[in-house]
Image (cartoon, grey):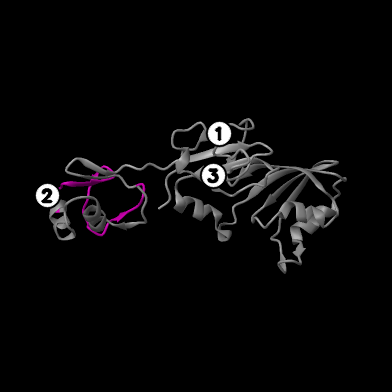
Amino acid sequence: MTFATTRLDRFIARNTAFNKSTVRLLLAQRRVVVNGQFANSIQQQVTPFTHVEVDGLCLNNHTPLYIMLNKPKGVVCATRDDRHTTVVDLLDHPRRDELHIVGRLDFNTTGLVLLTNDGNWSRRISLPQTKLPKTYEVVLSKPVTADYISVFQQGIYFAYEGIHTQPARLEITGEFSARLTLTEGKYHQVKRMFGYFQNEVLSLHRVSVGDFTLDDLAAGESRELLIAPAG
């Protein structure tokens, strides 16, 4: 069952034989339970994950689902694809068809992908205003030097869009490797930022999104996350 947030009286009228004018009486008779508590207002908001019972009959028991996946190279960030394996194909979960992807990765980019059936949550963490940090491990074709750090911090001009990237934090981890943290996600942004130095990205691996980190999750594996649903 999918629907937008709506008032309790409208939800009950839509899903039972009761009409809106009788819902107030149902509440007075303590016949409506919302999330384990007797309902006290017909204007109470019902979301896709609100548990609603009328006379003991459950009208909405849809539960939120949040999953973290370590995407391997060569897997598509899509729910369906006729030619390639998708991130959803990798999930061994009975409710995988409910999920959509939060923050896609390119075909050859590996690492952390989030999937959910909670649209409010995915919109909230995807909004540019949220500035959720995303960290990548990068391997490059040429040495990474200290001057990259200040340039990335200042932002790089993308002529095609006519914009400057937001300040990014770069940590040099080896002669040909670095760890980069961004708070935005422009098209091929990491490759284009290193392209400013004519330095080709050979591999790109996302290790974290906000507080979510891959830790010891192996490539192709996934696990459920315990998160309170977005209001």
Q: What is the CA distance from the residue labelled 1 to the residue labelled 2?
A: 46 Å
Residue visible at 15% across and 47% down?
A: 30
Could you say which is closer to the camera, residue 155 or residue 102?
102
Does 40 appear in magenta?
yes
Q: Which label sits in the foreground, 3 or 1?
A: 3
Q: Which residue is mark 2?
A: 29
What is the secondary structure assignment of the residue under circle 2?
loop
Q: Which residue is mark 1?
A: 222
What is the secondary structure assignment of the residue under circle 3?
loop
Q: Residues within 10 Å of mark 3 (few under 14, many from 20)?
A: some
Q: Earlier in the sequence, mark 3 or mark 1?
A: 3
Does 148 appear in magenta?
no
Residue visible at 71% across and 67% down?
A: 161
Q: What is the CA distance from the residue labelled 3 to the residue labelled 1?
A: 15 Å
User: Outermost residue, bottom direction?
Assistant: 162
Indicate which disc residue 79 carries. Answer: 3
Where does the magenta region start and end? Answer: 28-49
Most common SS among magenta residues = loop
